[in-house]
Amino acid sequence: MSIKKDYIRPVDFKHGRVDMNHGAGGRASAQLIAELFARAFDNDYLRQGNDGALLDIPAGHRLVMATDAHVISPLFFPGGDIGCLSVHGTVNDVAMLGATPLYLSASFILEEGFALADLKRIVESMAAASRDAGVPIVTGDTKVVEQGKGDGVFISTTGIGVVPMDRQIGGALARPGDVVLVSGTIGDHGVAVLSQRESLEFETTIESDTAALHGLVARLLAAVPEGAVHCLRDPTRGGLATTLNEITRQSGVGMLLQETAIPVAPQVNAACELLGLDPLYIANEGKCIVICAAEHADAVLDAMRAHPLGRNAARIGSVTNDPHHFVQMATGFGGRRIVDWLSGEPLPRIC
Amino acid sequence: MSIKKDYIRPVDFKHGRVDMNHGAGGRASAQLIAELFARAFDNDYLRQGNDGALLDIPAGHRLVMATDAHVISPLFFPGGDIGCLSVHGTVNDVAMLGATPLYLSASFILEEGFALADLKRIVESMAAASRDAGVPIVTGDTKVVEQGKGDGVFISTTGIGVVPMDRQIGGALARPGDVVLVSGTIGDHGVAVLSQRESLEFETTIESDTAALHGLVARLLAAVPEGAVHCLRDPTRGGLATTLNEITRQSGVGMLLQETAIPVAPQVNAACELLGLDPLYIANEGKCIVICAAEHADAVLDAMRAHPLGRNAARIGSVTNDPHHFVQMATGFGGRRIVDWLSGEPLPRIC
């Protein structure tokens, strides 16, 4: 391969494929970075051109750091793709500590032979999600593995954000008497991915709810005094049921949910019945649970409902005193059952 | 599978294997995190138990963020493994901006069927490297992909650190007249991995140089006035040759190296001759290039040589005025040749 040719020939994003050279750290790597990643993500930090980024952080804050590996299959699904998902997932983890997300890093593990056209589509979706969220991708890395040693593309993102010094929000802070709210319908993401994977056709397309929630979180936090919101968490893998069990264990409390109050879209309910799945265990990528002091619950709910991503927000239960840390649910038939952790695995590689 | 049993039976790290449940976000995921990751990495930040970590940052600094995906094959090699490598690689990227690394995040992509004993060995090596470096792993994520869709384990790490407000170190800051130093022998890591992979037997075992360089960097920066060191970079993928070409392009300068001054261990030289490789293009994981003002070069060199990781530090060339941004080398035979970027790929999956 002549060096001259290498300089002149642009990357073929129409018919080209990832090859091992793209991960070798030489000329082909530099070219892929310049013509794809740097162009799509373009910002002052990436333009620094070093192996890390130099960043400014507002004074008087604590830092939040969160990371997520994304291995979803299929890579493209109704309502999104691994690119935007990898931005939303990490922005949300940062936002769930009450922090303002500021910067993202991205590391890509590409499989040899993966179509560069698909990679470009994913990177551009990621760039759009990053722009929409106002959180730039400031540094990154790309590796390539041999065909059969990966699965198209895996993306790990890490986010950093800042939180006011005195803000206390976390999974260990739920207190008996608190109210449990959810920002909208549950199960949309998992069912959308599953229907795509199994080529299931429903009457209406079910779309993933993948979205960045930091705007919604900022809105609801601004609506109540500091300290009113005790706990925020996004119910991803394991669904609402598993996430609430994590919180009861961390906080040393119990919960009582009202089954009829939990919002589930009719088509998601129908799909779950057909597939023998329980929406309580299905992953979400654009929903958050809010646990707050009872006297502020209405204000939080109103603030969420005033935001496009919280239109279907609902009060779904309350925090109880329970030495067993059980999540219980009052069913539509007047009974009561224990909502346990996800134990088996209904849906692999959902995020 | 009974829930009760799940509670009681500990993870079998002797004979067990990764299964899809370990990545599902339910009980098996929580158990693997508790019994492996949280135990090995144990620190106050991880114990917060949220999807992100709340961190303190000293005032009056700028932040540095760097990320690396690690896909090295084989996972274990003379002198290290993917675990310690994933700590060193990212700590070094942070240190190369003159920053003090403070925190790491880690995301794991595991292949179904991977031996839990190997995973444990890797995680414990990672924990030891993190402790030795004084940089805790504060948050993480674990995903599992089906057998044949991964390769044992991939690890992406992200590091953050702080740098004094007025410190200016970067790849674009090399100036004609500057001196080029390297902290030790080159090519050790790549040759060690290759010899393991190809089951090559040399008379003496060649070990990877994988190491965290932030201590060495702190030492050399303390030895000279602020501003004396213009550029630091670790020559990983693509080796010394490619890294120097990156710098000449970024800084808009040229370089002239002295071939006989570049330190190469005799057994690495011998292995390279046997394999038809050029040590200039072989990856290093515990070496740094320092470009500094000529009048401070001796002080930097002395400081490096006084540190265990810089014993073989050497002055290998100087920065020139060159509109073509070429890296040239005066050879041992009195000639001169251009040292180009890595173009083909001699060694895939070296980090």
Image: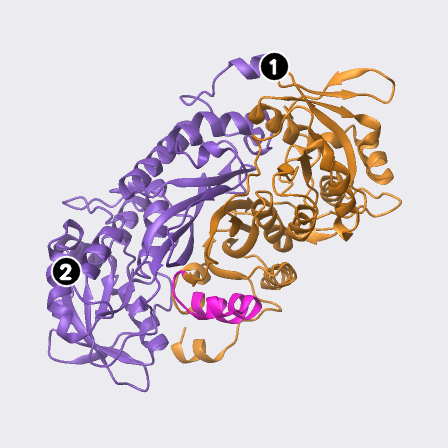
Chain colours: A orange, B purple
At label 1, counting other C-alpha atoms closer than 10 Å, the crowd grade (few under 14, some 14-19, many 20 or more) is few
Depth check: give the residue in front, B181 or B160: B160
On the question of residue B109 being in view, the answer is: no
- Residue at 14% x, 69% y is B297
Q: Residue at x 12, y 65 (%)?
A: B299
Q: Secondary structure at mark 1?
A: loop
Q: Which disc is residue A323 wearing? A: 1
Q: Observer-nearest residue: A82 or A226?
A: A226
Chain of the residue that carries numbered disc 2 in the rendered image: B
Q: What residue sits right under mark 2 in the picture? A: B313
Side of B162 where A191 appears, left or right: right
Q: Amino acid at mark 1?
A: Pro
Per the rendered image, the range of residues in magenta is A29-52
Residue A179 placement (x, y as % from top left): 72, 31
Q: Are marks 2 and 1 in contact (CB under 8 Å)?
A: no
Badge 2 marks a residue whose secondary structure is loop
Picture coordinates of residue B169, whole percent (x, y): 31, 67
Task: Give how far across and how far down residue B187 sits, in percent.
Answer: 23, 57
Q: Give left or right: position of A238 versus A143.
A: right
Q: Position of residue B198 (x, y in %)?
A: 30, 46
Whether residue A171 appears in this view of the structure is yes
Q: Is residue B296 magenta?
A: no
